[in-house]
């Protein structure tokens, strides 16, 4: 049981950090490198983690993300969103993400991604978890929804420090409750504030409404 507990701590750390190597995990969790390595190898064999051969860092796979968050009720949301994400990526030629709100409404997790084919890409958020106080566009939009704001809420992020720009709109389920958000993310030189306001805002609201209707939403 103690071995299993240690292994799950490794998964939890990857969930929080996004990606990490054996040495870092060992130091942060106060576990031996041998224990960490065995846990990662086992998870990799079962398709729960993936290793970047260049950096030798591990990250959660899409299977682990969905399994870890118990997506029995949200599977339809993820499946219905897949063609939506692909179409948006094709239309905008920028990275498009899907973030899901947890059942306690305390944080979001990025569960799907369609990456741009452009050579300059943004760092992947797939598998990462953020609290609703975070500055990502999805977190900001969903925080407003959780606080009671109605409608299909759009919010954005634009940072000269991180050189990231993005917009997100919430998706509602059949009860009208916020369930997640569709997000577009790009370097700031490709996604200006004007473009966020005039193109991304109305486009994501339209797509979010369409997806919500497929989930049974009825205003």
Image (tube, grey):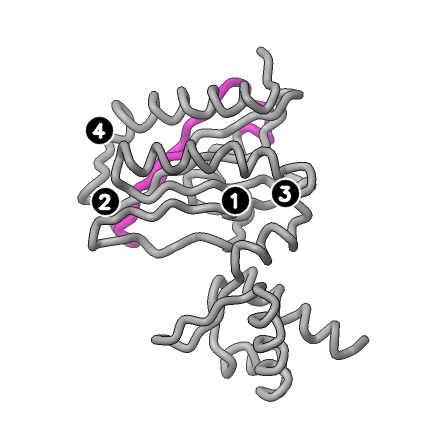
Question: Looking at the figure, which quarter contains the N terminus?
Answer: bottom right
Residue 86, x across and y down, in percent: 37, 37
User: Gap between marks 2 and 1, in whole Å?
Assistant: 22 Å
User: Gap between marks 2 and 4, in whole Å?
Assistant: 11 Å
For mark 1, give the secondary structure.
loop
Residue 47, x across and y down, in percent: 57, 64
Q: Nearer the viewer, residue 114 or 11?
A: 114
Residue at image point 40% right, 36% down: 85
> Magenta residues, as a range?
145-168
Q: Tell whether position 162 is magenta.
A: yes
Residue 109, x across and y down, in percent: 54, 48
Q: Tell whether position 71 is magenta.
A: no
Which label belongs to residue 194?
Answer: 4
Residue at image point 46% right, 25% down: 208
Q: Is there a contact, CB below 8 Å, between mark 2 and mark 4?
A: no
Labels 4 and 3: the sequence-earlier one:
3
For mark 4, give the secondary structure.
helix
Which label belongs to residue 188?
Answer: 2
Labels 1 and 4: the sequence-earlier one:
1
Q: Which residue is mark 1?
A: 133
Task: Give the number of the mark in front: 2 or 3.
Answer: 3
For mark 2, give the secondary structure.
loop
Image side of residue 56 versus residue 70, left or right = left
Q: Which residue is mark 3?
A: 102
User: Gap between marks 2 and 3, in whole Å?
Assistant: 29 Å
């Amino acid at each position: 049981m103690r071995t299993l507990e240690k292994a799950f701590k490794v998964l939890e750390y990857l969930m929080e950090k996004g990606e990490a190597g054996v040495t870092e995990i060992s130091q942060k969790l106060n576990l031996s490198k041998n224990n960490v390595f065995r846990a990662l190898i086992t998870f990799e064999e079962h398709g729960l983690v993936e290793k970047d051969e260049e950096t030798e860092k591990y990250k959660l796979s899409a299977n682990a993300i969905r399994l870890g968050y118990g997506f029995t009720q949200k599977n339809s949301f993820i499946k219905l969103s897949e063609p939506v994400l692909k179409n948006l990526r094709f239309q905008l030629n920028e990275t498009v993400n899907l973030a899901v709100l947890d059942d306690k409404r305390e944080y979001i997790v990025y569960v799907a991604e369609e990456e741009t084919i452009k050579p300059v890409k943004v760092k992947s958020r797939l598998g990462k978890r953020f609290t609703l106080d975070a500055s990502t566009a999805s977190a900001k939009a969903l925080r407003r929804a959780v606080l009671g704001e109605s409608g299909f809420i759009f919010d954005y992020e634009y940072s000269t420090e991180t050189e990231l720009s993005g917009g997100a709109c919430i998706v509602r389920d059949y009860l009208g409750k916020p369930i997640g958000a569709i997000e577009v993310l790009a370097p700031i030189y490709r996604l200006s504030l004007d473009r966020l306001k005039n193109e991304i805002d109305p486009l994501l609201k339209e797509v979010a409404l369409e997806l919500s209707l497929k989930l049974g939403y009825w205003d």
